[in-house]
C-alpha cells in the first residue's frame, strides 16, 4: 500500500534523531532542517536555514498568498524532540513503526506528526496550483524542548526580518478533539501559562558527616524543595478557562459555578485531558532536579536544585515572591528560564476561520478555547508582536489518552488523525 504524503513525511522526520538533552550536547536539528528544506525547495519555495550554534538549525520560507496586502501568518513547528530510551519502549522509538493504525515513535505527537501535517497541506496546495489566502511564513525551529533559546528566541532576536511583519501565527497543541458525553469537542488554544524555571541555591557550613551539624546546605535545600512541592496554589479561573468550563458544563448538563466541587465535576467530565485543564486553573511549582555533595561523609557547603514553575497570565511577580518565601532564608531563588504568558481572544477572525475549517469535515463538533499549561514557541513570536494560537487539528479516537502521549513512552498518533488534520489545514490556509 502506498503511503500518503503526511504519513511518509511523519515517518521520515521521526527517523531523524533530533533529541534535545537541554544543556548537554545532542544530535541537533540540522539533518531534519535539511530534509524539510529539500521538500520545500522541491515545491518551488526558497527556504533559508540558520544556525544559532553548529547543528542547532531553524529554517524559514515565504509562501506567497492571494492577498499580499494583508500581514503574513506564521505557520510554525519545532524539529527537536525530548529524549527516548529503547529499554523503556515496546518499539524502537526512532523507527517510526506503523501498527494498530498508528505511527509509533518519539515526536509522533510532539510534534513531527504535526510538522508533517503542515508540510503535506502545503505540498497538496502548491501541486494543485492553489495559494493561501495571504502570505504564509513557514518556520521550523530548533530547541523548543529547552525553552527555544537556540531556536525561536534566537531567530526573533537575530533575524526578525524573516517574519516579514507577520501579526498572527498558528502552531502545536491546539485543535485536537476530546469526547465529552456524546459530543466531540475540539480544544483551540488561545493562551499559555508563563514559564518560570528557577534554581534553588542553598548554603551552609561544610563539615564531617559524623558531627552534629545544624547548618546543613542539603537539609536547607530539602526543606525548601518539600515546601515548594507541597504548596497548594489557589484556584483562579481566567477568562478563556471560564469559557471552556461553561461550554463543557453545558454539554454535561451541569449548572456552572466557580466553586471547587463544581469545577472538579466539569474537569472530570473531560476525561484524560482534564489533567491539562486542571493545571490551567492555578499556578504550579514542581521540584524536578537536585545536585548536592560529593561524598557520603562530607557535608557540603552548597546544594542546588531546580523547580519548574508555571504562572497564570499576569502573575509572574507574585509567583516568584511566593517561591522565595517558601524557599526560606537559607536558600536563594535564582532565575533560570523565564518566558511570558499569553492570553488571546477566542472571538477573533482567525479563530472563526479555523472553526469553519474543522466543521466542514465534522459539522456537529463543538470548538472551545483552552489555555495550555505548558508553553510553545508562540511565546517568542509574541515579543515581536505576533499573536500565536495553537491549531494542529486532530480528530482522535475517544479511548486514546492523547495528553499522556506528550513526552511519554510509546508515543503514537493515529494515521486517520493526520489525514484529517491535513484536510483541515488545506481549508484553513486557503481561507486564513
Image: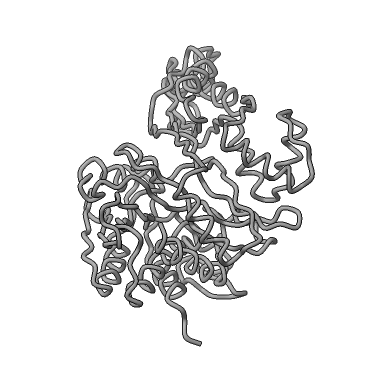
Give the answer, above or below, for where 173 lies relative to 16: above
Q: Is residue 82 left or right of residue 35?
A: right
Q: Is residue 183 left or right of residue 294?
A: right
Q: Is residue 135 left or right of residue 368?
A: left
Q: Nearer the viewer, residue 322 or 92?
A: 322
Quadrant occupied by the C terminus: bottom left
Q: Nearer the viewer, residue 409 or 304?
A: 409
Q: x and y percent of residue 326 in the render? A: 54, 18
Residue drawn at (58%, 37%), measured in percent from left and top? 280
Q: Is residue 112 left or right of residue 418?
A: left
Give the answer, above or below, for where 116 lies relative to 28: below
Q: Is residue 28 visible?
A: no
Q: Quadrant of residue 266?
A: top right
Give the answer, above or below, for where 407 lies relative to 226: below
Q: Is residue 43 visible?
A: yes
Q: Nearer the viewer, residue 226 or 174?
A: 174
Q: x and y percent of residue 261 in the render? A: 77, 32
Amino acid at each position: 500500500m502506498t503511503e500518503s504524503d503526511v504519513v511518509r513525511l511523519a515517518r521520515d522526520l521521526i527517523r531523524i534523531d533530533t533529541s534535545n538533552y537541554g544543556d548537554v550536547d545532542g544530535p541537533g536539528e540540522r539533518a531534519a532542517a535539511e530534509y524539510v528544506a529539500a521538500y520545500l525547495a522541491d515545491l518551488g519555495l526558497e527556504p533559508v536555514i540558520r544556525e544559532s550554534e553548529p547543528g542547532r538549525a531553524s529554517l524559514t520560507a515565504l509562501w506567497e498568498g492571494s492577498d499580499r496586502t494583508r500581514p503574513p501568518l506564521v505557520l510554525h513547528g519545532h524539529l527537536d524532540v525530548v529524549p527516548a530510551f529503547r529499554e523503556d519502549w515496546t518499539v524502537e522509538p526512532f523507527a517510526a513503526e506503523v501498527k494498530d493504525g498508528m505511527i509509533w515513535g518519539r515526536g509522533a505527537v510532539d510534534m513531527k506528526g504535526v510538522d508533517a501535517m503542515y508540510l503535506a497541506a502545503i505540498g497538496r496546495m502548491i501541486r494543485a496550483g492553489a495559494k493561501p489566502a495571504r502570505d504564509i511564513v513557514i518556520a521550523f525551529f530548533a530547541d523548543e524542548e529547552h525553552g527555544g533559546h537556540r531556536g525561536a528566541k534566537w531567530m526573533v532576536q537575530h533575524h526578525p526580518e524573516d517574519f516579514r511583519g507577520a501579526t498572527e501565527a498558528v502552531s502545536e497543541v491546539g485543535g485536537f478533539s476530546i469526547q465529552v458525553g456524546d459530543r466531540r469537542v475540539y480544544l483551540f488554544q488561545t493562551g499559555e501559562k508563563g514559564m518560570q524555571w528557577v534554581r534553588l541555591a542553598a548554603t551552609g557550613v561544610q563539615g564531617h558527616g559524623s558531627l552534629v551539624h545544624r547548618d546543613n546546605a542539603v537539609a536547607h535545600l530539602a526543606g525548601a524543595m518539600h515546601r515548594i512541592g507541597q504548596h497548594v496554589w489557589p484556584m483562579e479561573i481566567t477568562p478563556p478557562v471560564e469559557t471552556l468550563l461553561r461550554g463543557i458544563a453545558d454539554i454535561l448538563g451541569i449548572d456552572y459555578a466557580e466553586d471547587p466541587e463544581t469545577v472538579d465535576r466539569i474537569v472530570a467530565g473531560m476525561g484524560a485531558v482534564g489533567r491539562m485543564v486542571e493545571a490551567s486553573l492555578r499556578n504550579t511549582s514542581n521540584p524536578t532536579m537536585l545536585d548536592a555533595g560529593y561524598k557520603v561523609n562530607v557535608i557540603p557547603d552548597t546544594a542546588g536544585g531546580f523547580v519548574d514553575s508555571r504562572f497564570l497570565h499576569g502573575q509572574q511577580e507574585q509567583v516568584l515572591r511566593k517561591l522565595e518565601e517558601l524557599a526560606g532564608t537559607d536558600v536563594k531563588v535564582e532565575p533560570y528560564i523565564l518566558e511570558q504568558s499569553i492570553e488571546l481572544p477566542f472571538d477573533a477572525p482567525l479563530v472563526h476561520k479555523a472553526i469553519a475549517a474543522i466543521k466542514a469535515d465534522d459539522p456537529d463538533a463543538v470548538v472551545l478555547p483552552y489555555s495550555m499549561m505548558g508553553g510553545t514557541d508562540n511565546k517568542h513570536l509574541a515579543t515581536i508582536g505576533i499573536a500565536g494560537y495553537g491549531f494542529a487539528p486532530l480528530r482522535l479516537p475517544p479511548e486514546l489518552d492523547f495528553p499522556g502521549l506528550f513526552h511519554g513512552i510509546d508515543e503514537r498518533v493515529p494515521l486517520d488523525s493526520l489525514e484529517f488534520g491535513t484536510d483541515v489545514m488545506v481549508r484553513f490556509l486557503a481561507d486564513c
